[in-house]
Structures are given as structure tokens and as C-alpha cells.
Amino acid sequence: MQLQLFFPFPSPSPPPLPQIPTLIITSTLFSSFFFFFLVVLVLFSSHQRRQPKGKILPPGSMGWPYIGETLKFYTQNPDSFFANRRRRYGDTFKTHILGCPCVMISSPEAARIVLVTKAHLFKPTYPPSKEKMIGPQALFFHQGAYHSRLKKLVLAAFLPSVIRGSVSEIEQIVLKFLPTWENTTINTLQEMKRYAFDVAMISAFGHKRDSEMKGIKQLYQCLEKGYNSMPLDLPGTPFHKAMKARKQLNETLRRLIQERRGNEKAGGGGLLGNLLGAKNHKVDQLSDSQIADNVIGVIFAAHDTTASVLTWVLKYLHDNRDLLEAVTREQDGIQRKIIEENRRLTWDDTRHMPLTTRVIQETLRRASILSFTFREAVEDVEFEGYYIPKGWKVLPLFRTIHHCADFFPQPEKFDPSRFEVSE
Ligand code: HEM
């Protein structure tokens, strides 16, 4: 998912403040400062008062009222920001960023509690503009029965038994792209996005894709362009264009859904087929807009993430020549076998790429493309001996966990052998 984009990492340090003539400010400086100090004091003390007696908030600094630690977060390397606080305060610590009191979670056990075992106490939280753009009925924005039902249906579309049939079709996509990358300079991320999008289309719409696919691709690209823009819904803004594309995408998908509903044989598999299939069980019946929001949502979740990971795989292989040679030898071996046996790539071949698989695992760890996710406490929560007030954001820090030397010695080193399983 594109969660990192909901909470972008810092841009370079802000430019120095312009020089203001000293004479102008001297008369007002003292009174402004005094007023500011009073406001700060009042806010700070009211903030302190909100904590019930006997309840201990996690350790950490809330920084300045309102501003909190936002400036530090945006001017420091985010890895150091989190690692320093983890070192000072432990795995669970509090801070205050972008106007939100937050509890940072940097142990796998605690992250599991927030995301899995006590998930009902921590609701997903996204900016309303993102929810509008992806579709409010997509599973990411829900908890409870609806979320579990959707999650089961989505997972069922990506079971090995289901996707194994797509391997040779995916191979064809790669073979189509390869000649276009030869003897030329490419933007790796953009090309990986093109590739990942074509694969996502198979996963979403199955083997029997319709004539509508080209239109869907164009509308999706427009949606993606406006996704991280200012949520200003005025004619001409990227956000407005993206929302327009989103509406058109909905109409196209609804047409497709109606066609497939009306023609049992059309089936077509993929995620769409699965979500349509849910109508067989009355309790699971999904409306057209529930189906459309989830198809678009999963394409969003799958597309950019996969493209980013692939780009990092290429970068790490480029930087580690010995590994590149070893991975090439492994892939050459499989290619020779396919040629000898006069067949296409199969699922079983992909199960016989131990080094390539470890390179992907280490890339997922080292690059940690989704640094963290967000939840919000739905009530006052007792958490590992601490108190988390209702409404506070709770952020499991995946990247900090992946870069912790206790779990991954020399965490900055790209070393796929750490994923070797001892026999
Ligand atoms: C390889 C790169 C990927 C990474 C690093 C990644 C990471 C994540 C993370 C961290 C979450 C949890 C977000 C949260 O609960 O707040 C998530 C959720 C999700 N991802 Fe991915 N993802 C990747 C690829 C994919 C792909 C290829 C698909 C689809 C086939 C996908 C579908 C989903 C869905 C449906 C959810 C929501 C699950 C739920 O709400 O319970 N992701 N992903």
C-alpha cells in the first residue's frame, strides 16, 4: 500500500529565515514573546491535566504544544529520529507530530498486538481525501466483520493455487518489455510501474480481460497523478482531475460488473471474479460500488509497492556484483531447463529460485518501502503497562523493526544470506 505517501518523509532542511530589520522588531518582540510564552504555558498545562491519575503515558517527549516534534521530524533523517528515541525510551514511546499525539511501536510483538490480536482497539485512519479517491468501501478503511469478509475474498484471489496459472502469462509480459529496455537508458521505477500495472490487471480482472482495459489504464494513471497532490477540488487542479478520473473509473467498472453479472459464462476470474462470486452466499453479497472500491483499492495497494520493491532489487543487485552474478547463474539454470524441456516458465520453477527469493526478502527488509502504518486508539487503551488515550495515533514502525540490530545484525548491510534457513 501507499501508506508512506500519507505521511511523507522529510524534504531537505528548510531555507534560512530572511533577515528582518532589528529596529522594527525590538518594540514588539518582548510583548509577542511574553504572549507566546503564556499561550504555551496554558496549553502545556492543560495538556498535562488530561492524563488521568495513576495512568502512565509511554515515555518520550511531546515537544512543543501544537508543533510537538514536527520540526525535528522534518529536519532529521527519519531513521535517526526513530532510532534515537527507541534507544532513549524503549520500544514504545510517545511523540507529537503534525498536530497529532502519537505512540510509536517498534517491537514485533507490540506491532502484532496493534495490527492483529487487539486490532479492534485500533482503527485504521486515513486522510478523508485519500479515502474519497480510493473509494470509501475499500477494505483498508474498515474494521470488524466487513473487513474480515473482504480480506478473505481478496486473499482467496491471491492464493498460490489461484495465481500459479498466471505465471506464464506474466512471463509473456516480461518478454514483451525486455526488448524495449535493451541498449537504452530507462527510468527504472517508471518501467517497473508499467510492468507491475500489467500484472495487476491480470490479478484484478483475470485471464478474460475486456476491451475496457486500455481506458481503465488511462483513468488509473490520471488518478495516480493526483493522489499525492493538495486535496483542492477546484477545476484544473490535479486533485480535481484525479477525482474526475475516479468517477469515470467507477462508471467503467460498474459497466464491467453488470456485464459479468449478466453473463455467468463471462466469469473471467481474478479479484473481480472472486468478489462477484460472493453473491452465491447471500450473506456475502456485495454491491457494485463495494466491488469497484475494492478492485481499485487493491490495484493501488499492489501496483506502486511492487514497482518500488523491484526497483530496489535492481539497485541492490547493481551495487553487489557478486550477488548479481550468482542470481544470474540461478536464473540461467532455469532458463536452460525451460529451453531443454521446450516449455514456458511455471509456478514450480519460481519455487526453485532460493537465492533470488532471499534477495527479494532482504530487499523487503533493507528498503522497507512502507516505513510505518497508522492506527488510532478507539478508546483509552492499557498497552504494555502504559496508557494510550482515545484518539491518539499509534504507529507500528516497520522500518525501525527491520533495521534493529537485535534482530538483523549489521542492519545496514545488504545480506540475503541472513534469510538462509538452517536445515
Ligand atoms: C511487495 C510490496 C508490498 C508491501 C511492502 C506491502 C505492505 C503492506 C502493508 C505494510 C500493509 C498493512 C497496512 C495496514 O494495515 O495499515 C498492507 C496492506 C495491504 N496490502 Fe500490501 N504490500 C505489498 C504488496 C501488495 C500486493 C502485491 C497486494 C495485492 C495483491 C497488496 C494488497 C494489500 C491489501 C489488500 C492490504 C490491506 C489488508 C488489510 O486491510 O487487512 N499488497 N500491505
Image (spheres, rainbow, N blue to C red):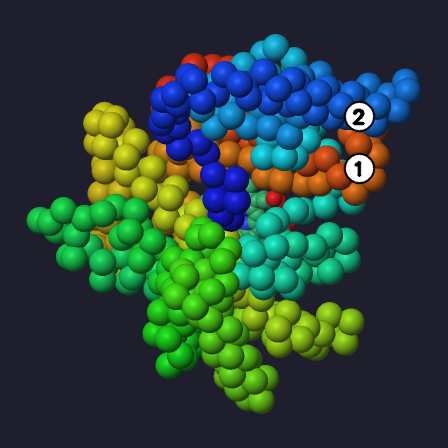
* Percent x, y of residue 106: 61, 24
Q: Secondary structure at mark 2?
A: helix
In the displayed structure image, the side of residue 327 where residue 373 appears, left or right: right
Circle number at residue 53: none
Q: Which residue is mark 2?
A: 46
Q: Which residue is mark 1?
A: 390
Q: Nearer the viewer, residue 206 or 76?
A: 76
How far apart in space, not on screen, are marks 2 and 1 (Cα)? 17 Å
Amino acid under disc 2: Ser
Amino acid under disc 1: Lys
In the displayed structure image, the side of residue 195 where residue 52 appears, left or right: right
Above/below status of 302 relative to 94? below
In the displayed structure image, the side of residue 106 where residue 344 appears, left or right: left
Residue drawn at x 11%, y 49% is 184
Q: Secondary structure at mark 1?
A: loop
Q: Nearer the viewer, residue 370 or 180?
A: 370
Q: Nearer the viewer, residue 149 or 57?
A: 57
Residue drawn at x 62%, y 76% is 288
Query: How many residues crowd around disc 1 within 10 Å: few (fewer than 14), some, or many (20 or more)?
Result: some
* Percent x, y of residue 290: 64, 69
